[in-house]
Amino acid sequence: MYSVYHETYILLATIYGGILIGFIYDLYKVFRGIFNPKKLATNLQDIFFWTIITIVAFYVLIFSNKGDLRFYNFLGFVIGVGIYYYLLSKKIIQALTFLVRLLKQFIRDLWKLITYPFHVGICLISVPYSYCKMRSKPVYYKAKRIIKLPSRVVADCKKSMIHYFKKK
């Protein structure tokens, strides 16, 4: 038999475990809301979520009362989740969403900072290239026409000869 003091400790530990489970659920909810995974990823995340919840529940039960299951253990988990949901959940979700958006913006800015020298290098190469291409385009096409001129003259001569001999 446990003393009343020890049973109160077990109840408070399971309430704490319920609060922790509620927090993990909010993390899971924010993660799913941001990344919007497909069906297979959702199933894998669900399995991972329930595995973590099971580990937390077993950890709380093993270290609080050596794994003995009592009604007040389940009641403590439910009370803990209820306390978390009604008192902390909205503020925690807002804070987590803010932190994730901040982290997302930081990663985006960091990526821009890292890739900026490459963009500058590409610009330094492409701007002279496009300028040279724009300036040399008419010359290129004129040269192409001049180079193809003998073959076009021969082809036109063949056509006119064939046309001339077909008439007779």
Image (cartoon, rainbow, N blue to C red):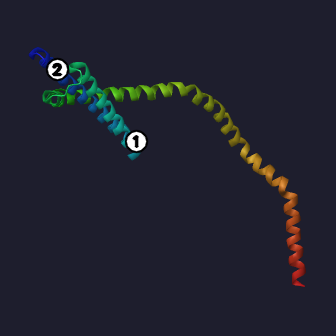
Q: How many marks?
A: 2
Q: Residue at x 35, y 38 (%)?
A: 47
Residue situated in front as seen by the camera: 5 or 16: 5
| Dot 2 alpha-carbon crowd within 10 angstroms: few under 14, some 14 to 19, many 20 or more | many
Q: Could you say which disc has been placed on residue 41 in the image? A: 1
Query: According to the image, label 2 marks what residue?
Result: 10
Dividing the picture into quadrants, the one containing residue 90 is top left
Q: Secondary structure at mark 2?
A: helix
Q: Residue at x 85, y 67 (%)?
A: 156
Q: Quadrant of the C terminus?
A: bottom right
Using the numbered discs, state the Cα–Cα distance from disc 2 to disc 1 in whole angstroms: 36 Å
In the depicted structure, whether residue 43 falls above or below residue 82: below
> What amino acid is at disc 2?
Ile
Image side of residue 19 versus residue 120, left or right = left
Q: Quadrant of the N terminus?
A: top left
- Is there CB contact under 8 Å for labels 2 and 1? no
In the depicted structure, whether residue 135 falls above or below residue 10: below
